[in-house]
Image (cartoon, grey):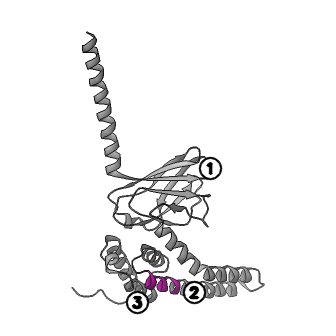
Amino acid sequence: MKIQSMNKNIFLLLIVLAVLISCNKKESSEFYIIKGEIENFEGDIFLSPGIDTLYYSNNFREDTATVVDGKFKFKLSTKIETPLPFAIRSSNSIFTMFFLLEPQNQELILDSIDFGKYPTIVGEYQLLYDEQDLLIERMRSSKEKLASSMNEIYSSNYSNDSILKLVDIAKNKFKKSSLFSISEFSKDYPDSYVSFWYLALSQMIYGYDIEIENAYNNLSQKIKNSDVAKLFEQKLLMSKVSQTGSTFPAN
């Protein structure tokens, strides 16, 4: 009887171990795990798309994580094949700046949830974080000039019509300067998805601009062969047609 009982217990233990192994394999095969840490925060946070959801091909909508003891975990589908932009938001809809995540297991550290910040990617996939930091630094002067111009305009005694015109001028200067920075960055880093996603974001904000098209041409063929790049080309062409009145090329 004792032998039968032991055999029964061993059999049950093997079943439990098999189930646990099966569950672990299922999770690891279906999802990448994004582990993170955040200071002085408790509660739910959300990993959200950082750009037009069409770029995610129904492989991602939004993921929720509960911060416990400063730690949280998100999941990304393993169907995702290229780095994609994301933002983290709080329950009161405060978003971080967008940042890029590789289709891999990763770790990130976040000081706070604020529009002016984004997480630090740690470990072997820090390259995109470093490249984004570099591009933001190149664009810093343009942002500072825009902020200074806006403060000067809105603190003036100009009429409303004059203020609107001056705001448009300041925004156009910022657009030209920032697109130039992105274009130069795309020359220096043709294999970088940072270059690509800042161009995609620019297209979403500004529509068609020749500087966006020229900068895209600087990117490597590897990026241009990706599904996200093909979608970008379609969106760029559609915005070009709508803004210039040209026709689609004949097949």
Q: Amino acid at mark 1?
A: Phe
Residue drawn at point x = 61 percent, y = 62 percent: 114
**x and y, in percent, of residue 244 in the image:** 40, 89
Residue identifier under label 2: 172
Q: Is residue 44 left or right of residue 251?
A: right
- Label 3 neighbour load within 10 Å: few <14, some 14-19, many 20+: few
Q: Compute the Cα span from label 1 to label 3.
A: 48 Å
Q: Would you place residue 153 above or below residue 25 in this image?
A: below
Classify residue 75 as left or right of residue 153.
Answer: left
For mark 1, give the secondary structure: loop
1 vs 3, front mark: 1
Residue at image position (38%, 82%) is 219
Q: Look at the numbered disc 3 and give the secondary structure of its residue.
A: helix
Instruction: Measure the alpha-carbon separation of dots 1 and 2.
Output: 38 Å
Q: Between residues 125 and 215, which one lies in front from this camera angle?
A: 125
Q: Name the residue located 45 percent from the left edge and 55 percent from the top edge.
A: 62
In the rendered image, residue 218, in percent from the top left (x then y), is placed at 39, 85
- Which residue was labeled with disc 3? 244
Q: Are marks 3 and 2 in contact (CB under 8 Å)?
A: no
Residue stretch rendered in magenta on the structure: 180-190
Mark 2 lies on a secondary structure that is helix
